[in-house]
Image (cartoon, rainbow, N blue to C red):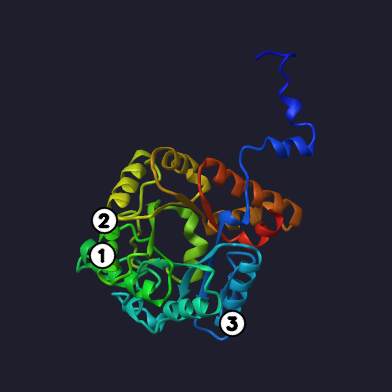
């Protein structure tokens, strides 16, 4: 191709032609809405995440109803528990009358057609904030944690979760969860594996929202992935597929678009990506309170994740983005 026979701008000049030749399209079908739920009678704002709230039961159902109206296919639930419900082993995670099982039952009774994704992890339930139980040395015990996570996955699926989503990054947890689900007769339960979850600074607002910042001077780099590593992500994902995962997750999204592309190009499984709390807060800060600017930033950022190869995007922007699509 050479100029002037080829003028690339010919297909950019008018809105109609830009729409006709667009290579990537967004729709509400591409979105999953993460929701924070707590035990209180009133919802509460999350200062680190403008517009986001910890939801009481009534407000959570209203958010679910709104998601259905906007054609958002699914919501993902995360519990914000008071300190008195947390302990070193995260035992509240296995309470069938706990916050998330009750919330799942309420959602499926009221809105059976709405997809419900339930997080499988211990960090919202542990007093130390880690994703697993600790030994005497203060190290996360992988295999003991995996046994608890498998039980949690079954509990959540029995409560109504359509998709259970292990986000802990323990070795072997997908195989253990799949075996436990099969044994419990829950063979149709889908597993969304946080297969490439990086030890990222972009999680800070989320951890503040859940009160799950880890204690004792330890961090999560011992089990979450090193941000320097790209090829390792494919190895993690292949292992999780072999163990029984149905869908793979990359988290965070925008700082790891290369990983999203690698997974989408090399693996025969749907790849989702999580536009995490830090990305959300960053775009709000960049917009500086300008609604038009925020709208453009929001849509461009989600489009970039979809363009990289993600089939769906978990984003707190879902209720704002869906009406524009």
61 or 317: nearer the eye? 61
Q: Position of residue 40 (x, y in %)?
A: 53, 84
Residue holding disc 1: 146
Q: Looking at the image, tell me whether mark 2 or mark 3 is earlier in sequence order.
A: 3
Residue at 37% x, 75% y is 158
- Number of residues whose C-alpha sits closer than 10 Å to that of mark 3, classed few (under 14), some (14–19) or many (20 or more): few
Spatial CA distance of label 3 from label 1 is 33 Å
Question: Any mark on residue 171, and which?
Answer: 2
Q: Are marks 1 and 2 in contact (CB under 8 Å)?
A: yes
Determine the secondary structure under disc 1: helix
Residue at 35% x, 73% y is 126
266 or 169: nearer the eye? 266
Residue at 74% x, 31% y is 12
Q: In this view, does 291 lie to the left or right of 243?
A: right
Looking at the rendered image, the quarter that the N terminus falls into is top right
Residue holding disc 3: 58
- Number of residues whose C-alpha sits closer than 10 Å to that of mark 2, classed few (under 14), some (14–19) or many (20 or more): some
Q: In this view, does 236 lie to the left or right of 302?
A: left
Q: Looking at the image, tell me whether mark 3 or mark 1 is earlier in sequence order.
A: 3
Q: Position of residue 299 (x, y in %)?
A: 66, 50
Q: In this view, does 77 lie to the left or right of 245?
A: right
Determine the secondary structure under disc 2: loop
**Dividing the picture into quarters, in which one does residue 171 lie?**
bottom left
Residue 81 in sight here: no
Q: Is residue 92 left or right of residue 302?
A: left
Residue at 78% x, 39% y is 15
């Amino acid at each position: 191709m050479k100029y002037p026979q080829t003028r690339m701008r010919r297909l950019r000049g008018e809105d109609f032609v830009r729409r006709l030749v667009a290579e990537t399209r967004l729709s509400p079908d591409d979105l999953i809405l993460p929701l924070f739920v707590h035990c209180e009678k009133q919802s509460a704002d999350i200062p680190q995440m403008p517009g986001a709230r910890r939801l009481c039961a009534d407000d959570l159902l209203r958010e679910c109803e709104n998601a259905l109206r906007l054609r958002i296919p699914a919501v993902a639930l995360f519990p914000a528990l008071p300190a008195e419900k947390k302990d070193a082993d995260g035992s509240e995670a296995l309470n069938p009358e706990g916050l998330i099982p009750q919330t799942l039952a309420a959602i499926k009774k009221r809105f059976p057609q709405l997809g419900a994704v339930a997080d499988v992890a211990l960090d919202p339930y542990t007093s130390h904030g880690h994703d697993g139980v600790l030994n005497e040395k203060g190290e996360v015990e992988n295999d003991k944690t995996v046994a608890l996570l498998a039980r949690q996955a079954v509990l959540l699926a029995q409560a109504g979760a359509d998709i259970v989503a292990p986000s802990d990054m323990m070795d072997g947890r997908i195989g253990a969860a799949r075996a436990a689900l099969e044994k419990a007769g829950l063979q149709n339960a889908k597993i969304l594996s946080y297969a490439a979850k990086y030890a990222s600074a972009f999680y800070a607002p989320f951890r503040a929202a859940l009160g799950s910042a880890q204690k004792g001077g330890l961090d999560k780099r011992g089990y979450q992935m090193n941000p320097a590593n790209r090829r390792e992500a494919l190895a993690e994902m292949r292992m999780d597929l072999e163990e029984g995962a149905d869908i793979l997750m990359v988290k965070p999204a925008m700082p790891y678009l290369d990983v999203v592309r690698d997974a989408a190009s090399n693996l025969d499984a749907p790849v989702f990506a999580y536009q995490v709390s830090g990305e959300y807060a960053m775009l709000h800060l960049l917009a500086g309170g300008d609604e038009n600017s925020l709208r453009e930033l929001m849509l461009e950022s989600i489009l970039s994740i979809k363009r990289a190869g993600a089939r769906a995007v978990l984003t707190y922007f879902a209720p704002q983005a869906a009406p524009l699509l």
